[in-house]
Amino acid sequence: MKRQFVLFLVAIQFLTRLPVPRLDRFEEDWLSRSARYFPVVGVLVGSITVGVWWLSSACFAPAVAAGLMIAASLIVTGALHEDGFADVCDGFGGAATRDGVLAIMKDSRIGAYGAIGIAVMLGLKWTVLASMPRSALALTVISASMVSRWCTTGLIWRLPYVRADADAKSKPLANSLSTGNWLLSGVLGAVALVPAAWMASPSPTLPVLRALTLALAFASASTILAASYFKSRIGGYTGDCLGATQQLAELSFLLTALAAFTAVR
């Protein structure tokens, strides 16, 4: 049990800027094994951002509360996933060859494709969250945060890691996730989601549950498409691809949920 708690702390340390107890030692395979807790960290991040929304919505209009919620997410995660998404936009948009894509993504500077991509991504998120029904927003955001991080584990499970650089940030994740651990990550995320979901929405209606189920399907579809694209262009994934996948899955989840809520009004 202590070992699993350590792996959970490693997952928090990797995916967020949240303070965690100092570890006495670190083993190379801990990061790859901690991937099973990525969805649980998603529940944690989603719960924190929803808390910010709940407090700010008491004082501000929905658009301002939505903006503060996004800002909270960026602070908690250190914009880790958004940085990956911007790098993917630059790399895949600015190069035609595999080596060219990898070289551009390794460059820490942001280019035109990355700037445009992240502006569109954040703008869409802000618009969707500001338009989300208040009664369903908390549950939807926490669910999207969990599901999108589970989607990233799907890439680790199915695709090879393509960087050979020893200093690559995601190199320790290169050991592929077993099918059992991938399924376990989903189960752990779902278990963690139950109490958070109950606090966010003690009595969700059937239309809300249907909307979230549909959103899960579209988030999964976006991940499959992204994985296929990464496989065809560079032969696998990098850490930036994981960040981009999380962002695409989260946005797909939120957009689908909003569309479903709008349809049943």
Image (cartoon, rainbow, N blue to C red):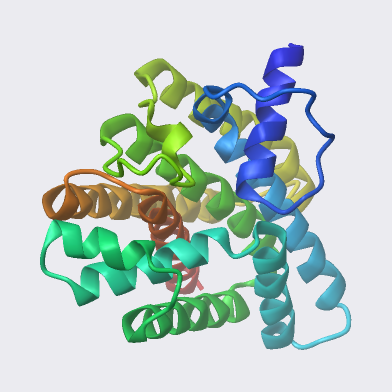
Task: Say if 10 sits above or below 95 in the image.
Answer: above
Q: How many circles with numbers are drawn on the protein?
A: 0
Task: Say if 24 sits above or below 70 in the image.
Answer: above
Q: Nearer the viewer, residue 253 or 32?
A: 32
The answer to whether residue 233 is left or right of residue 60 is left
Question: What is the x, y in percent for residue 81?
Answer: 51, 59
Question: What is the x, y in percent for residue 9?
Answer: 72, 33
Residue 155 at least partly seen: yes
Q: Which of 242 and 120 is in front in this view?
A: 242
Task: Say if 42 sits above or below 107 in the image.
Answer: above
Give the quarter of the figure containing the N terminus.
Answer: top right
Q: Which residue is drawn at 49% across and 28% down?
A: 32
Residue 43 image-quadrant placement? top right
Please identify the residue farthest to the top as the structure is shown.
Answer: 1
Q: Which residue is drawn at 35% across and 54% down?
A: 241
Q: Residue at x 61, y 21 (%)?
A: 27
Question: What is the x, y in percent for residue 20?
Answer: 81, 40
The answer to whether residue 9 is left or right of residue 123 is right
The answer to whether residue 189 is left or right of residue 244 is right
Q: Which of 204 and 55 is in front in this view?
A: 55
Please identify the residue farthest to the front as the structure is shown.
Answer: 166
Residue 51 image-quadrant placement? bottom right
Task: Say if 261 sits above or below 200 in the image.
Answer: below
Q: Residue at x 65, y 58 (%)?
A: 77
Residue 256 at least partly seen: no
Residue 218 image-quadrant placement? bottom left
Question: What is the x, y in percent for residue 126?
Answer: 57, 80
